[in-house]
Image (cartoon, rainbow, N blue to C red):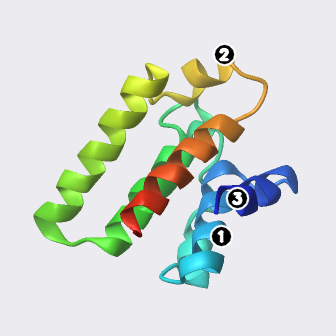
Amino acid sequence: MKELAKKYYNEGMGCSRSILMAFRDKYGYVTHEVVSSANAINNGFGIGGMCSALVAGIMIIGLLYEGEEAYSERMKLMSCFQCKFCSINCMSLAKERDDCTDLIDFVCDYLEEKMK
């Protein structure tokens, strides 16, 4: 999945759309409308806010789980991401890298584990 997400990313799709489209192509679940809902999510919402790759991961978790389980799974993803990259903030993350492929890889790998 992560190779497909990086392909979309390298074609100019934002982090969130790249992950959503790759998940859709591999597993389904993600509709055209869900992908379209990420049209305005990019570069930390344009203000350097929360990482868009992480937002896509949370969106997919919301499709896979319900209620308290969705909340718990979201917190696990956010915690793992924070521990690995020391931030969930796009601006902070962008300062340390040339592109976001490692963030995309991490979110894709995390979601792939959930699909096993």
Residue 21: image tag: 1
Q: Residue 15 or 40: which is nearer the viewer? A: 15
Does dot 2 land on a helix, a strand or a loop? loop
Q: Is residue 12 visible?
A: yes
Does dot 1 land on a helix, a strand or a loop? helix
> On the image, numbered disc 2 is attached to which residue?
96
* Whole-number angstrom distance, CA of label 3 to CA of label 1: 7 Å
Does dot 3 land on a helix, a strand or a loop? helix
At label 3, counting other C-alpha atoms closer than 10 Å, the crowd grade (few under 14, some 14-19, many 20 or more) is many
Q: Residue at x 16, y 63 (%)?
A: 69
Q: Quadrant of residue 84?
A: top left
> On the image, numbered disc 3 is attached to which residue?
5
* Whole-number angstrom distance, CA of label 2 to CA of label 3: 21 Å
Q: Residue 24's spot in the image, x, y percent?
A: 59, 77
At label 1, counting other C-alpha atoms closer than 10 Å, the crowd grade (few under 14, some 14-19, many 20 or more) is many
Q: Earlier in the sequence, mark 2 or mark 1?
A: 1
Q: Earlier in the sequence, mark 3 or mark 1?
A: 3
In the image, taking residue 46 as reference, residue 77 lies left or right, namely: left
Q: Residue at x 85, y 50 (%)?
A: 10
Q: Residue 32's spot in the image, x, y percent?
A: 61, 83
Question: Which kind of residue does numbered mark 3 sit on?
Answer: Ala
* Quarter containing the N terminus: bottom right
Question: Which kind of residue does numbered mark 2 sit on?
Answer: Glu
Q: Residue 104 or 13: which is nearer the viewer? A: 104
